[in-house]
Every structure is written in structure tokens, then in C-alpha cells.
Amino acid sequence: MVHSGDIVTLAAGHYRLREQLAGSAYGVVWRADGGAAGEVAIKLVNREQMTRAEPTVQARWAECAAREIAFLSRLAPWDARHIVRLLDHGLHDGLPAMALELLDGDLAAHMAAQNATARRIGLAQSLAWLAQINAALAKVHQHGWRYLDLKPGNLLLDASTHTLKLADFGTNRSLLDAGAHTYTGTASWQAPEQFFPEGAGHLTDARTDYFALGAIFFYLVTDGATLRYSGACADAWRAHGRDGAAQLLAAWQVAVEQFECHGRQAVVQAMVEQAHDVARIPGREP
């Protein structure tokens, strides 16, 4: 486990960790001092989470980091307009690590700050940011990947230009691999095919990313709201984990049956009741 003050040595330099900025199941991001290079963001594999996983799946942590480095290292300099820049990479304690440009927080934090001061993101700014995100996704697809984790937390704000940059590419999946894959991403921002499995896994393609882009547009123009469908998926995931999709499908099937038997008013009531049941976490009152 790393601590503030530790030195991370990569291919092009040494970086002293200052403070942890963010963390997820797969990675942790630190503000670091790169000497003449200035401040950077150091992204490391979340070793603590990795060691808790079954030994048979621990390799996924290194694979996600290696996949992100491989994608970012192939980008041209002008691609940095809307995608976070990779500055350096190498190994730290035997696992892939990278130095990224340090930006000014993510879209989720920016939205929270706007709402706290009763300010809104205007339509013109929302459309401009949407175009920037779309350009970033196009670049991901051009390089043969689908992104699969578009959400406010992965969109970083460059305060100097007031633009957004896409970050965190560990969930990328090859567009050439059309087969079903394991679950990945964040439930509250996923297209149906990414949340609900089809046979042995999830069948996604580049279009899956554009569902999430639409959800981001809704988020921007509604002061941070999420789609009701997406909220239901998130609630089901929090309550039941990987079983949430099956629980939600069962609830919706009850609603359909109610509609067929009793009409619209009955289906509305059934959906409300079933949604409460799905979101109820065992041992905790809803």
C-alpha cells in the first residue's frame, strides 16, 4: 500500500506522491510532484482490492491498466484536446503505473458545486461539452475500442480552457471482439445490453457508448439528474449486485402482466411496488 511521500519511479522520471485524489475498484489516483515536470496525476493499480479478489481473476487489474496505457500511448498529440494526456508510464511494485496530466476535478464534482451555489450549466455549454465528449468517443472507436464506462466521474475538467477530457480507459473492449464479455462499467449509466446479460455475458458495441452519451446530455441539461431507467438499474445493482438485472427483469415482467390484465393504472401501481421491493437491501429498511 502506498502513502503520501512515497516515490514512484517510471520510465522518464521520479514522482513523489502528495495526496490521493480518487479511487475505484481497479485504480487509485494521486497528486504527485514530478520535479521539473511539475504536478501530475499518478495512477496505480488498486492492489488492496486486487488481493481481495479470487486468485483466478486478479490478473484483470494489471490487464486493465496495461490496456489503458496501450491506448493512450498510441494517440497523437492533437488527440489530447479531449482525452487526458499520458506523460509517462512503467511498473511500480511489479504492476503497470502511469503519469497523467493533472486536471481540475471531474464533471460530477463540478455539477455538485454548481448546484450548491444555485448556478446552472447553460444549454450552449452543455452542447459544447457534448461535442467534446463525442469527439473523444469517436477517437476511442477509431482506434478499435468501445469505451463502456462513460459517466461524469470519468470526464475531467480543464479549467484553463473550460473543456472536458475523457479519462479512465481500463474498461475498453476491442470492437473486433463481438462476443459476449463479462460485466463492466457503472450501472447508472449503462445501455440495456450492458446491464442485462444475454446468455453467457453482455453483447455490446460502439452504439452502447452513445446511449451513455445521451444520458450525459440529460444530466447536463437537468442539473445533474439521471434517467429513471438508469436510476432503477443503479438501485437494483446496489441492492443485489450481479443479481440485480434478473431481479429488475422479474419486477418488470410482473408490471407487464398487470398491464395485460388490468390496464395502465394497475401497471403504474405494480411498477412502484416492485421497484420498492427490488431496491430493498436485506437487513435495511428502504
Image (cartoon, rainbow, N blue to C red):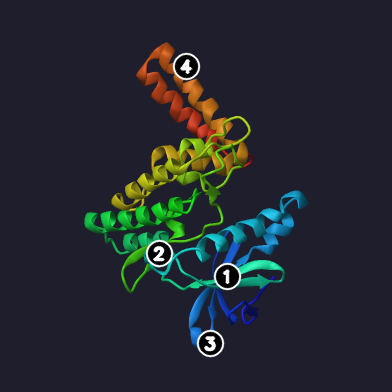
Using residue 155 as the reference point, say whether residue 99 is left or right of it.
Answer: right
**Vertical placement of 170 versus 230: above or below?**
below
- The one of 79 and 184 positioned closer to us in this rendering: 79
Q: Marks 1 and 4, how far apart in space?
A: 52 Å
Q: Marks 3 and 2, how far apart in space?
A: 25 Å
Q: Amino acid at mark 3?
A: Gly
**Vertical placement of 61 versus 199: above or below?**
below
Q: Marks 1 and 2, how far apart in space?
A: 18 Å
Disc 3 crowd, CA 10 A, few/some/many (<14, 14-19, 20+): few
Report the disc number at residue 257. Answer: 4
Q: Amino acid at mark 4?
A: Glu
- Identified at 23% across, 54% down, the residue is 123
- Identified at 27% across, 58% down, the residue is 128
Is disc 1 in contact with disc 4, using a CB cutoff of under 8 Å?
A: no
> Which residue was labeled with disc 2?
79
Disc 2 crowd, CA 10 A, few/some/many (<14, 14-19, 20+): some
Residue 132 visible in the current orientation:
yes
- Identified at 47% across, 54% down, the residue is 143
- The one of 160 and 277 positioned closer to us in this rendering: 160
- Find residue 176 and report its image quarter: top right
Q: Nearer the viewer, mark 2 or mark 4?
A: 2
Residue 285 visible in the current orientation:
no
Using residue 185 as the reference point, say whether residue 50 is left or right of it.
Answer: right
Disc 1 crowd, CA 10 A, few/some/many (<14, 14-19, 20+): many
Q: Nearer the viewer, mark 1 or mark 2?
A: 2
Report the disc number at residue 35. Answer: 3
For marks 2 and 4, the one nearer the N-term is 2
Q: Secondary structure at mark 3?
A: helix
